[in-house]
Image (tube, rainbow, N blue to C red):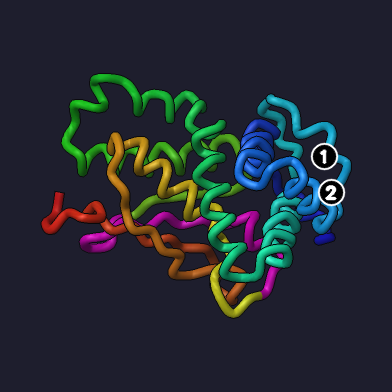
Amino acid sequence: MFEPSGLYYPNRIARAFFVAMDDVMGQNGLNMLLGGAHLTEYAATPPPDNLNREFDFAAIAALNESLEHMYGPRGGRGMALRIGRAAFAHGIKGFGVMRGLGAPAFRALPLEQRIDFGLQALATVFTHFSDQTSVVITDGDALLFKVENSPFAWGRTSDKPVCHALVGIIQESLRWASNGYEFYVREVACRATGSDECVFRINRTAIGESSSM
């Protein structure tokens, strides 16, 4: 188990991950994952549905590492992507600023604006409700989602980026904001590999589109 970080997700975001893990892995798979992460106390009682910042980043890192041990680096990456996408669908999109992305007025905006606003909204949720400070900047024909303290990389050392669940969350937030488009998202820097922050690069052009939006 990782040493406590003193940084936290709110219980509501952590709970969304537990619902997502159960959805993707099944109860038996989730129990095995919790055992590997030394978090069996959550097997019967997941985090409560409130905004208290009580779920330590060290626990998220332990779950992420346990997932890789269970499925291997490649299989763990695929599972983490699915869990991240499901976590957005099961809870993160319910935060107020994200709910606004489903409003008719927002859906009427040009696609490029919806993508920009959707990523900004996601960054706002993490920065405002958790200790995961996130910002979005423009980089030519791409957007960069920068995370100062990624819980998925907390205390970890790796030769490759490890924040696959965050990639999944970003992918699903973009699909939600764009009303069904898929976008290429790649982690290009990770604290687990020695970088100062975790950086995710998002192509502005949707997959299958041949020109800029």
Query: Residue 207: x, y in percent?
Result: 25, 55
- Classify residue 201 as left or right of residue 126: left
Res 39 label: 2
Among the 4 quarters of the image, the one containing residue 150: bottom right
The answer to whether residue 9 of the structure is visible from this angle is: no
Question: Does the magenta run of residues contain 141?
Answer: yes
Toward the viewer: 112 or 136?
Answer: 112
Q: Residue at x 54, y 59 (%)?
A: 78
* Residue 126, image x, y percentages: 54, 41
- What amino acid type is highlighted by mark number 1? Tyr
Q: Quadrant of the N terminus?
A: bottom right
CA distance separating discs 2 and 1: 6 Å
| Amino acid tagged 2 | Leu
Q: What is the magenta range?
A: 138-157
**Element at label 1:** helix
Q: Residue at x 72, y 63 (%)?
A: 70
Q: Secondary structure at mark 2?
A: loop
To which residue does mark 1 refer?
A: 42
Q: Position of residue 201 (x, y in %)?
A: 37, 61
Q: Is residue 135 left or right of residue 31?
A: left
Q: Nearer the viewer, residue 100 or 90?
A: 90
Q: Is residue 200 left or right of residue 75?
A: left
Q: Residue 82 appears at what percent x and percent y?
A: 53, 50
Horizontal arrangement in the rendering, residue 58 relative to residue 115 (left or right): right
Residue depicted at 61% across the width and 45% down the height:
24
Residues at badges 2 and 1 in contact (C-beta under 8 Å)?
yes
Circle 1 Cα neighbour tier, 10 Å, few/some/many (<14 / 14–19 / ≥20): some
Placement of 192 over or under 62, stated as above or below: below
Q: Is residue 112 magenta?
A: no
